[in-house]
Image (cartoon, grey):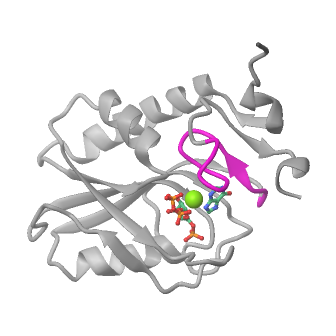
Amino acid sequence: MDVEDIRADLTEVLITEEEIHAKLAELARRVEADYADTTPLLVGVLKGAVMVMADFARELRIHIDMDWMAVSSYGAGTESSGVVRILKDLDTDIAGRDVLIVEDIIDSGLTLSWLLQNLRSRGAKSVKILALLRKPESIKVDVDVAYVGFDIPPAFVVGYGLDFAERYRNLRAIGVLAPHVYE
Ligand SMILES: O=P(O)(O)OC[C@H]1O[C@H](OP(=O)(O)OP(=O)(O)O)[C@H](O)[C@@H]1O
Ligand code: HPA
Ligand SMILES: [Mg+2]
C-alpha cells in the first residue's frame, strides 16, 4: 500500500529541522548565561509548545524545573478572542520563582499577554518569554519577548508542534500549508 506523506501538504518549508535546532542551541547559550545564578521554572504552553520545550530543555546544560499550562483563547472561532481560559493550571507554586514561558508562536500576542499578567500576579520573581516564532505583522498587543527564534510572515504555518485542526504537529520542519488542505 502507498503511504501518504503529509509533507506533501506543504507549499513551502519555511524553517528546516536543522535551522530550528541551531536556533534553539543559540538561545540556550543565552538562557544559560542569564539564569546562571538561579534554577528557572520553564512553563510550556500546551499543546503547541511541546516540541520546542522538549528540544530546548535538552539543549540546556543548567538545572531547570519544568511545568505545563494549557490555555484556550480561540474558542470555536478562528480568531483569538483575547479571553483566555485555563484548561490545565501549573502544579507548581511560582511565588519567588524565575519563570520562563516557552511558546511555539506569538501571533496576535493575546495569549502571551494574558499569560504574562496571570503569572506575574502570582508573585513570581521574574517572568520572561521564549517564543520560537513571531509574526510581527500580526501582533495586536505588544508583548516583551526576551528570546525569539524567528520572525516570520503572517501566513498560517504548521509543523513542529503547530497544528491545523490538530494535525501536522508531528512534522519536523515548519512550513506553509497548501490552500487545497483547508479550502
Ligand atoms: O498570539 P496568539 O494569537 O494568541 O496565538 C498564539 C497561540 O495560539 C496557539 O495555540 P492554540 O490556542 O491554537 O492551542 P494549541 O497550542 O493547543 O494549538 C499557539 O500555540 C499559541 O499558544
Ligand atoms: O500560524 C499558526 N499556525 C498554527 N497555529 C497557530 N496559532 C496561532 N498562529 C498559528
Ligand atoms: Mg493551535
Instruction: State whether residue 160 is above or below residue 181.
Output: above
The quarter of the picture where the C terminus appears is bottom right
Taking the image as drawn, is residue 40 in sight?
yes
Q: Position of residue 176 (x, y in %)?
A: 78, 45
In what quadrant does ligand 3 lie? bottom right
29 or 66, nearer to the observer: 66
Instruction: State whether residue 64 is above or below residue 173.
Output: below
Question: Where, by quadrant of the figure, is residue 15 drawn?
Answer: top right
Magenta stretch: helix, strand or loop mostly: loop
Q: Position of residue 167 (x, y in %)?
A: 63, 46
- Magenta region: 154-168
Is residue 156 toward the left or the right of residue 133 in the image?
right
Q: Position of residue 129 (x, y in %)?
A: 39, 60
Is residue 75 toward the left or the right of residue 115 in the image?
right
Q: Residue at x 36, y 64 (%)?
A: 70
Residue 162 is a magenta residue:
yes
Q: Residue at x 76, y 13 (%)?
A: 1
Q: Residue at x 12, y 49 (%)?
A: 38
Question: Where, by quadrant of the figure, is residue 114 drawn?
Answer: bottom left
Q: Position of residue 163 (x, y in %)?
A: 61, 50
Residue 24 is a magenta residue:
no
Q: Residue at x 34, y 75 (%)?
A: 86
Instruction: State whether residue 91 is above or below residue 138.
Output: above
Is residue 84 toward the left or the right of residue 1 in the image?
left
Q: How many marks?
A: 0
81 or 3, nearer to the observer: 3
Q: Which residue of the protein is positioned furthest toward the top in this rendering?
A: 1
